[in-house]
Image (cartoon, rainbow, N blue to C red):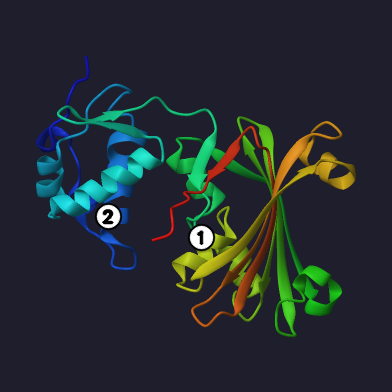
Amino acid sequence: MATSAPAESAGLGDDISRIRSRRQLHTEIREAILNEFILSGKLAAGARLPSESELSRLFGASRVTIRAALQSLKDQGYIRIVRGSGSIVLPRPESISSGIDRLSSFDTFAQQSGKKIRTADLEFTRIDRDDDPLAEVFEPGPVTVVSRTKTIDARKVALIVDYVPESVLPLDTMRRRFDGSVLDLLLTDGVAEYSDCTLIPVVATGELRDRLGCKDGSPLLQLSELTRDSVGAVVNRSEAWLSPETFRFQLRRRRES
């Protein structure tokens, strides 16, 4: 039988309800619920989240906003909503799953799926824009290339190569602040506004196979992404090769109005 955790006894700190202004309120509340109740292990699979009215009091938000946060958690596969019974925590998925329309890093996807993802084989390189065709999307000048693999349980699950103009993030700054994700740095600095992505299936051969340590011909997902600022200038080019066993993306399709 599902058990309920009253909001008053959940032991949440005061900082849980300090909502930052740069994102929508229901998004902040969704992440607070996810981190404090689900990913923390406070509520096991089958347990009930506090009711909408309890969450509304806890966060000082309307029930409409709380409902939107819960619906987002449902869409991500963390809970199921049963009319008359509340929101039930679901077992954790084995893969890292997220909507591809969210501008979030792979580190964030993993953290929200309860996975510990680590960075390996990290390399920083300074090139001129004209040295690499992939950097030609930028204005003339030096470009920082950040290459690394990602591991989960000591298994390589991704190879990621980012290109960032030094006018956006100087190489020395990148080295000092980098903590696994270039996109997270750009989001923190308020530089990244949106991105255009292409996702295609590829197979691992040659250098790609060797860097990921997988079998020749293994299937991969290649995500090519151009991230832009508020005026449309490209601030980051990212090429990522991902294990389809680990990363899964969803896209919600809606009928035309």
Above-or-below relation of 145 to 75: below
Q: In this rendered view, identify the residue nearer to me: 244 or 35.
A: 244
Comparing marks 2 and 1, which lies closer to the viewer? 2
Q: Residue 212 location, x and y as percent?
A: 77, 40
Identify residue for label 1: 184
User: Residue 26 bears which disc, if any?
Assistant: 2
Query: Could you tell me the amino acid type at mark 2?
Result: His
> Image check: 85 left or right of 156?
left
> Image check: 55 left or right of 20?
left
Query: Could you tell me the amino acid type at mark 1?
Result: Asp
Above-or-below relation of 5 to 149: above
Q: Residue 236 location, x and y as percent?
A: 63, 69
The local secondary structure at tag 2 comes to: helix
Q: Residue at x 57, y 56 (%)?
A: 181
> Image check: 105 left or right of 134?
left
Residue 104 visible in the shown view: yes
